[in-house]
Image: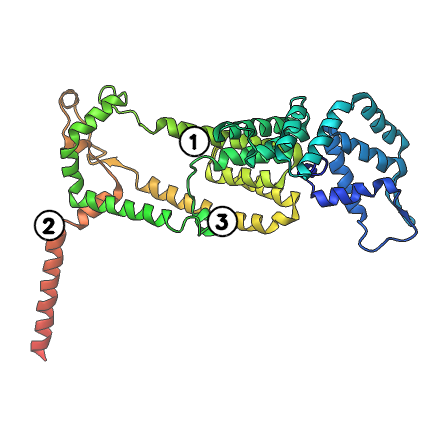
């Protein structure tokens, strides 16, 4: 990462360097040279440089001053109007607020980085970062993340890197906000959705089939009666484990509760930093991530209309996101339809008691012990299966078969 155009505040660094590099050369031509940036490119670069200047970026203010000092004209077309008042304001701010020590420190760090003296560059960037210089915070976090740790342990090195990324994010750096959001999102053991399997099959080729094979085996064991014997043999150990986990009145506390709470907290932090990048910088990537998290309820409330809104904002913010957003919207529509079908199925198959709904027990029956058969919860599917797979049903099928054979025999006798 260079000192001045490492991140470009969300703009491709080659564009910012190209446009602002020629800004001091008074780019006024009789006709437009070949491959010269268009008017839209200049306006986009000025807009992003202005965003960086608002966050205190020194060189962004200096380059804006050079642009407004001379303007940008190509033939009769004016790309950027000359504005001496704006140029004077930018130069005056630099005179009043620029720190020679800070500039010298960052210049030295950049030279050391280019000379592959990464530890020396990190020392100077850290000293500049402690003054609140966002670009130095980004560069120092980048070097720490790449393993230049100055004799720190790996854990402490990552903690220091995350602290600097957070500081840069709060200072207004969009790349830092996205990086911190990614850290909390991908650093958690998040759930695997079917979209992940479709988009990244190589990463989930084995874990997902193994997971469903395990579910199938558990189901088979439960219906073969193996789970009952296992409960009988492990009942004592299970009760001891329940007591160790803080079980009270026969109710066990989930031993994975702390891990689940930490998982949800990490996703909530990821959503916070993605929202920061979305609201302050209109980041297409942040909006896409927020849309995905709203779609699946990861750290945010599951909300399909809100997810679509973020997907649309991502498509409006970057032309490169058009294809990804179209795929995401298509899968989201399918996801929403499947969820509606599942919700309707669960509503229809809602567990009910086996007792007759019209039956009203008397006061004496209420005071007495309830029969376990009348309070057992059953779903509609259980009731249907119970009536289909029964001795009465088997007898009906058998009698129907015998009757059909008798009718067939009588027809053959008549012939």
**Residue under numbered circle 2:** 391
The residue positioned 74% from the left and 28% from the top of the image is 54
Q: Give the residue at x 83% y 56%.
A: 34
Q: Residue at x 73, y 31 (%)?
A: 107
Q: Nearer the viewer, residue 372 or 326?
A: 326
The quadrant the C terminus occupies is bottom left
Sequence-first disc among 2 and 3? 3
Marks 1/3: CA distance?
A: 25 Å
CA–CA distance in space, label 2 to label 3? 46 Å
- Residue 349 % position (x, y): 30, 41
Residue farthest left in this picture? 413
Q: Are marks 2 and 1 in contact (CB under 8 Å)?
A: no
Query: Is disc 2 surrounded by few (<14), some (14 to 19) or many (20+) residues within 10 Å?
Result: few
> Is 361 left, or right, of 55 in this rendering?
left
Note whether residue 71 is visible: yes
Q: Secondary structure at mark 3?
A: helix
* Nearest to viewer (mark 2 / mark 3): 3
Q: From the viewer's perspective, is the residue at label 2 or at label 1 nearer?
A: 1
Q: Earlier in the sequence, mark 1 or mark 3?
A: 1
Residue 177 can be seen in this image: no
| Residue that mark 3 sits on | 331
Q: Position of residue 42 (x, y in %)?
A: 79, 43
Label 1 belongs to which residue? 263
Is 149 situated above or below 209? above
**Disc number lying in front (1 or 3):** 1
Color scheme of the displayed model = rainbow
Q: Position of residue 287 (x, y in %)?
A: 59, 39
Label 2 SS: helix
């Amino acid at each position: 990462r260079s000192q001045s155009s490492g991140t470009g505040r969300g703009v491709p660094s080659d564009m910012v360097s190209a446009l602002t590099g020629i800004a001091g050369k008074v780019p006024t031509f009789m006709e437009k040279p070949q491959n010269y940036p268009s008017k839209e490119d200049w306006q986009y670069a000025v807009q992003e440089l202005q965003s960086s200047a608002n966050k205190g970026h020194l060189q962004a203010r200096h380059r804006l001053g050079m642009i407004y000092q001379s303007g940008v004209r190509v033939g009769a077309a004016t790309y950027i109007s000359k504005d001496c008042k704006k140029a004077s304001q930018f130069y005056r701010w630099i005179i009043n607020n620029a720190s020679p020590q800070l500039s010298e420190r960052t210049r030295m760090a950049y030279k050391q980085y280019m000379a592959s003296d990464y530890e020396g560059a990190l020392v100077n960037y850290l000293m500049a970062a402690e003054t609140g210089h966002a670009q130095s915070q980004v560069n120092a976090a980048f070097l720490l993340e790449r393993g230049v740790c100055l004799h720190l342990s790996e854990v402490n090195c990552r903690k220091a890197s995350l602290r600097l990324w957070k500081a840069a994010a709060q200072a207004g750096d969009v790349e830092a906000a996205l990086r911190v959001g990614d850290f909390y999102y991908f650093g958690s053991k998040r759930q695997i959705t079917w979209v992940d399997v479709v988009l990244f099959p190589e990463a989930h080729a084995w874990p997902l089939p193994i997971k469903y094979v395990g579910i199938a085996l558990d189901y088979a064991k439960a219906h073969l009666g193996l789970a009952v014997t296992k409960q009988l043999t492990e009942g004592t150990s299970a009760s001891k484990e329940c007591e160790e986990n803080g079980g009270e009145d026969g109710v066990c506390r989930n031993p994975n509760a702390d891990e689940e709470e930490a998982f949800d907290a990490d996703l909530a932090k990821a959503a916070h930093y993605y929202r920061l990048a979305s609201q302050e910088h209109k980041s297409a990537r942040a909006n896409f991530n927020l849309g995905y998290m709203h779609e699946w309820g990861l750290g945010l409330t599951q909300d399909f209309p809100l997810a679509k809104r973020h997907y649309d904002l991502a498509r409006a913010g970057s032309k490169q996101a058009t294809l990804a957003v179209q795929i995401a919207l298509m899968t989201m529509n399918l996801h929403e339809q499947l969820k509606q079908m599942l919700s309707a199925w669960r509503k229809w198959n809602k567990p009910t008691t086996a007792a007759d709904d019209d039956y009203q027990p008397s006061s004496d029956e209420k005071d007495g012990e309830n029969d376990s058969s009348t309070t057992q919860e059953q779903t509609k599917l259980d009731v249907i299966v119970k009536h289909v797979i029964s001795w009465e049903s088997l007898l009906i099928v058998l009698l129907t078969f015998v009757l059909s054979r008798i009718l067939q025999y009588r027809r053959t006798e008549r012939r």
